[in-house]
Image: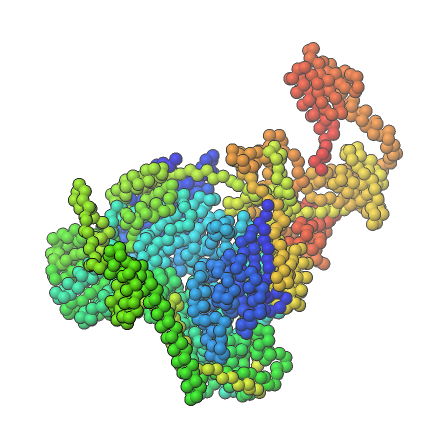
Amino acid sequence: MGTSVQVTPLCGVYNENPLSYLISIDGFNFLVDCGWNDHFDPSLLQPLSRVASTIDAVLLSHPDTLHLGALPYAMKQLGLSAPVYATEPVFRLGLLTMYDHYLSRKQVSEFDLFTLDDIDSTFQNVTRLTYSQNHHFSGKGEGIVISPHVAGHLLGGTIWKISKDGEDVIYAVDFNHRKEKHLNGTVLESFVRPAVLITDAYNALNNQLPTKQRERGFIDAIKKTVEAGGNVLIPVDTAGRVLELVLILEESPLNCPIYFLTYVASSTIDYVKSFLEWMSDNIAKSFEHTRDNAFLLKHVSLLINKSDLDNAPAGPKVVLASMASLEGGFAHDIFVEWATDTKNLILFTERGQFATLARMLQADPPPKAVKVTMSKRIPLVGEELLAYEEEQNRIKKEEAMKASIIKEEELKVVHASDNVGDPMVIDASNTQTSQEAVSHGGRYRDVLIDGFVPPPNCAAPMFPFYENASEWDDFGEVINPDDYVIKDDDMDQGALPFVSNMDGKLDEGPASLILDMKPSKVVSTELTVQVKCSLIYMDFEGRADSRAIKSILAHVAPLKLVLVRGSAEATEHLKQHCLKNVCPQVYAPQIEETIDVTSDLCAYKVQLSEKLMSNVLFKKLGDHEIAWIDAEVGETENGMLSLLPLSTSAPPHKSVLVGDLKLADFKQFLSSKGVQVEFAGGALRCGEYVTLRKAGDASQKGGLSGTQQIVLEGPLCEDYYKIRDYLYSQFYLL
Amino acid sequence: MASIGQAPSLKRRDPPAGREGDQLIITPLGAGNEVGRSCVYMSFKGKTVLFDCGIHPAYSGMAALPYFDEIDPSTIDVLLITHFHLDHAASLPYFLEKTTFKGRVFMTHATKAIYKLLLSDYVKVSKVSVEDMLYDEQDIFRSMDKIEVIDFHQTVEVNGIRFWCYTAGHVLGAAMFMVDIAGVRVLYTGDYSREEDRHLRAAEIPQFSPDICIIESTYGVQLHQPRHIREKRFTDVIHSTISQGGRVLIPAYALGRAQELLLILDEFWSNHPELHNIPIYYASPLAKKCMAVYQTYINSMNERIRSQFATANPFDFKHISPLKSIENFNDVGPSVVMASPGGLQSGLSRQLFDMWCSDKKNACVIPGYVVEGTLAKTIINEPKEVTLMNGLTAPLNMQVHYISFSAHADFAQTSAFLDEVMPPNIVLVHGQENEMGRLKQKLVTQFADRNTKILTPKNCQSVEMYFNSEKMAKTIGRLAEKTPEVGETVSGLLVKKGFTYQIMAPEDLHVFSQLSTANINQRITIPYTGAFGVISHRLKQIYESVESSVDEESSIPMLRVHDRVTVKHESDKHISVHWTSDPISDMVSDSVVALVLNISREIPKFVVETEAVKTEEESARVEKIIHALLVSLFGDVKFGEDGKLVINVDGNVAHLDKQSGDVESENEGLKERVRTAFRRIRSAVKPIPLSAS
């Protein structure tokens, strides 16, 4: 009866690899997230390549490489062709992130996994949704509804809710419950008892300091370095967590120059300025009231070129540069320059990906020296240039040759076809003439090419004559009204030039780099860098920490829980915790292991007849209204089951007390009624003799026993019955 | 089904009787057969929604408000504002701050940002006496905190009312709201346009067909000229006027359509270098402020603007300069001035009009819909003379052109829209009476074969419709392990949340909802020094099932009464009574307590245990009592064979089986009476059957 739900991890379980999972709902395959690491290691995508062609829709949750990096490659090479769904910021910032990564890579290597065009064409497939928008599938996925919800973590970050027939599958990774400067906290807690929840165990072992304390530490560390005359490098992602850091720095009292350096820094901020709807209430409010756009940056300068940074005035500065893993991009170069100076500070705000330079530096104790590869794209000079030009010439020549051969072949074809219906031949004696024409054609081919070749389909050697037969009817000549319609001029004519590029907003620098057809090559040198600068790691990842994850999971209390991404240790820890405190069915599948999380829920639908409902007395309890019904099953005209009132009197039933008693609340209630109450040894002492306590572990909400056991004890006295009455008033008796 | 009638005052809140729960009421409080003060009230199944909250631009003070007296503001759950125009949003601060309204208000992000600008300006500009002021800037500021934002397509649920909005294409941030209450959908279009223009997207066609469509009818059966022709007329008039040395006045609302006109003018100037020395002024104090809003919400605009935005901000005009007030205006030679308000009621546009109206070289271009009762409406008919602000009359010599860019749907758009959306019920609002009537006639013809109802209620006239919504429930969990056959019974908890129903077993309640169930175990100690056997004896006299046993843990004697209440002999000094709360158990336990207290009072007591004899005696006694009572009722009662009683009343004979209570008799009346009597006697003799357990 229930909807069949299967989950198959394709990447990112029992480790910190990028995320990519397959969720199959009644045979409709969703690929949720399509991540890649900063090394762009194709071997990670093996599992994806095996199923790529069967995927019906792709859902993206966050605009960083870990969540969408492999999308262009998968679309181009792995045969993925499904429509993609994402929020507007995930779409836009994801696109910029991919540009930044491509350009960083291209600068230092012959990167050929995908091109900018591939990125563009991939992102053209994206359908953009807003938060809480219900998107209904048709066709194969009939009945499935998806909707994105706020996840926190990154701008536009999404928790996906996939529903069918009232059963919800929720995919929530990297959520953040904390309200930040630019983002609202996640709404995950508003979902209650979904059929399946898929979440990550990445942070299951980490705990964070309070936000204020962390921010103060962050600013203090920077201040100290700057005041001592050192530079601060903060390796960041392209368009994700960096936004929060930019706001923190923008509001900080630092008086040294702050730079934000990525290949797409200025367009990132431009777009971010138009995403106020997606940000925190505070930002929206300040804009509504004063029209101050929080991302109208006054203290942070945007750079898209390393030379701009080199040209900046000397003296201490703070630089936010991509990529966070230090594996490439500007951050890599700056690190090599600055690492050797003890005054400088490299401030990590997130844990580096596995096996990256950033991760090595975050080790404790940090390495004294690291080996790095410095690569540079330099224009070819001298002999190399000559060789390159020769090669190019050769290629050109070959192409020209090929082209001419093709042309000749075409001509041959043309003439061959000429033979069939030579324009000059009108009468029937064609055999001889056509032979003549061949020799003729062969001899004067060059002349004929000069524009005297009649089109092959030309019928006769005469000027075309069209009979202008106009139709008449009773009212005169029949006209086609369309001929008289004034064409709607394209309003864009003469307007601003249209940018054909879908995005069109590449910054000047990289644009020149792409369009630069100057021959160039990549030169790499291996260096050993002495790491003398200070290294600090502070958690600004914007993910819920261990405690928050546990309390949110306990609150959401899914019927089935699937754990993905996170070290084996963290996954195991969270699994054990959840088994005990959240729900009895917790899964942590291996890569390519398909688990069936179809709910074992039985359900059927019935119609509630008007007669029955008119006699039902609902009791209101928060959002819910409940009542006890006894009904007889009947059938409507169209074969639906319906519930009718019982013809005989209702059978007695065991009475049910509905309500959730919180001892602390009850204590207040009693004292408001003038009863002396106090907690003593886990029990509530009411008056002199009566005690009230909860038996068993009632905190196990989704646990095995859902019924609270409350024990009321006392000697026979008036108080006892009074307190019992108060206690009963906290419940609804059905 | 639907009927129009004077509403019996919507304030009355009688408990819904019969079909009234299925009755959907729509009442325009404004904009019914008029344009201005849009405000439409809707109520269904006890849920109430108010669409828009505008003022009538032609009136001032309280007279400009919608008829709020008709409703009780405190009953409204949700108020939805479609866009920021004064006739749709300007009574909101009044409604929020000066009435008992306590529901929630929603509008789109862009609307909220501009709403504040526009209303602050409106309060400043409207020169009315203090007592006529509906609200002040402080009220607007406070109202901002109460307004919540909704993004296009975002689904929000309040109190069981689900709603979301679509792009309406009228102005930046304009929305059409779809409201879903218990499966009945109502679409309120607000002002909409199906034509894409320079910066806005066209109104969307909703994915689902609504049951009712409340649609604007501003332009009735008129047809717009194609947009490029209107644009050409517009630019031609301006071009020819200024080339003859005249001045052009364009009265327009400061925000909304003005931006579209500025885009046209700026582009026209860019393409005509010879005009570059002619200044264009955009005279609005909001000009600069609103730019930030327009620059931010490009995601609400069309693809064209968004792609232009990639290279340069299209709202960064090259040929248009702002003008703060008439004092800063140097009126020498030809110029083009766009000034607010659009209706020429007062303000800068009126000042310029007064200055320029008698010169025939000048021109006034009215670029949008003008409301009845304003000067702009008057001059469209080109009267010979006009009254100036200072009360004098002056000849109207300037040319007046009416070229509409107001982005309301025309007849072609309306009929195509309704054709796509296919609502079975259409309510027309926001249109002049005549226009609305004509539109109704035409739509009736168009949808003749579809059985579509088209209604045109006046202000405060209610439209009533009935929707029989079937209530469906989903039975889940343990109760649903087997789908029942017809005739079987289903017992369980019916849980209602919003408009969804679920039936489940009490044990499953915590699984499928946030609610939980509880058991209360009670333990009461009573001082008792007598023998435990006495209690046992007394209990057995009252209750049929009393089992003696010994507690396994503490090896103290205990009694179980009907498997509900346990009495334990804790020590020589006291006993304890244990049970789990439930009405019957509570009653049994009370009786046990009373019994124990009685025994304590009557000490000492000794009891000889003669169990077997006792039960026999007991049953004999019961039988005797039954017999005696029956005799007193029916007279002739004899013991028949096989233990049956034979009752003879006036020749009618009934046989009563004392064990099962079955009665056999020829006479139905007697049979029924005997059976009833026996049941009552039995419940008197054995008061607590306790079969419920």
Is residue A189 or residue A467 the one in the foreground?
A467
Q: In this view, does A674 lie to the left or right of A90?
A: right
Using the rendered view, name the quadrant where residue A301 is placed.
bottom left
Give the residue furthest to the top: B651
Residue depicted at 62% across the width and 37% down the height? B484
Q: Tell me if residue A542 can be seen.
A: no
Instruction: Check the picture and name the quadrant holding the C terminus of chain B.
Output: top right
Q: Tell me if residue B618 can be seen.
A: yes
Residue depicted at 59% across the width and 73% down the height? A354
Using the rendered view, name the quadrant where residue A507 is placed.
bottom left
Is residue A87 or residue A625 the one in the foreground?
A87
Residue depicted at 79% across the width and 17% down the height? B641
Asked if residue B85 is positioned above or below residue A361 in the image, the reply reads above
Residue depicted at 20% across the width and 59% down the height? A463
Asked if residue B653 is positioned above or below residue A101 in the image, the reply reads above
Is residue B413 or residue A517 the one in the foreground?
A517
Give the image location of residue A708, x and y in percent.
Answer: 67, 50
Q: Which colour scheme is used?
A: rainbow
Q: Is residue B645 left or right of residue A262?
A: right
Q: In this view, does A20 lie to the left or right of B576?
A: left
Using the rendered view, name the quadrant where residue B245 is placed.
bottom left
Give the image location of residue A336, x and y in percent.
Answer: 52, 84
Give the image location of residue A42, x and y in percent.
Answer: 55, 70
Give the image location of residue A315, x and y in percent.
Answer: 46, 87
Instruction: Check the picture and name the quadrant holding the N terminus of chain B.
Output: top left
